């Protein structure tokens, strides 16, 4: 089954989808800080993303990596938002003990977040 086909109906007849189905992301890193920009494919979905992709949900999603703080900066004219996530890179590119300390790969983790439409 394709990713785009994986949806579930909830009790109030909304549909749960992964964020990847509604948006794309671009990420970068500097030291222990990750910067992830998220943009809706369809600008009409921006309000849904703004409502559901909160600082609290993003912090919870990255908690297992030691994230300590998330700041969200809405970009309404671009139908997007930028997240700055602190202490998530486990030492950064040169200091991490894991195989990939780059923040670029972590945009896919954000895109796995489930939202209701």
Image (cartoon, rainbow, N blue to C red):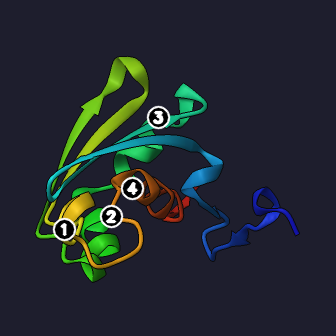
In this rendering, which labeled residue sits more in front, label 2 or label 1? 1
Q: Which mark is residue 52?
A: 4
In the image, 84: left or right of 15?
Answer: left
N-terminal label among 1 and 3: 3
Q: Position of residue 108 (x, y in %)?
A: 51, 58
Q: Which residue is mark 3?
A: 39
Tell me the CA gap for discs 2 and 3. 23 Å
Q: Position of residue 79 (x, y in %)?
A: 43, 27
Disc marking residue 101: 2
Q: Position of residue 62 (x, y in %)?
A: 30, 71
Of the pair 26 and 57, the residue shown nearer to us: 26
Q: Is residue 5 left or right of residue 88?
A: right
Tell me the mark number nearer the camera, choosing from 3 and 4: 3
**Earlier residue among tags 2 and 3:** 3
Disc 1 is placed on an element classified as helix
* Residue that sits furthest to the bottom in the current view: 64
């Amino acid at each position: 089954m394709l990713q785009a086909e994986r949806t579930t109906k909830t009790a109030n007849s909304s549909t749960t989808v992964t964020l990847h189905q509604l948006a794309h992301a671009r990420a970068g890193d500097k030291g222990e800080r990750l910067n992830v920009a998220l943009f809706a494919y369809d600008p009409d979905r921006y309000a849904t993303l703004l409502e559901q992709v909160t600082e609290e949900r993003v912090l919870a999603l990255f908690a297992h990596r030691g994230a300590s703080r998330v700041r969200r900066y809405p970009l309404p004219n671009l139908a997007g938002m930028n997240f700055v996530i602190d202490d998530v890179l486990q030492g950064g590119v040169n200091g991490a003990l894991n195989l990939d300390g780059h923040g670029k790969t972590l945009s896919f983790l954000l895109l796995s977040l489930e939202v209701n439409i």
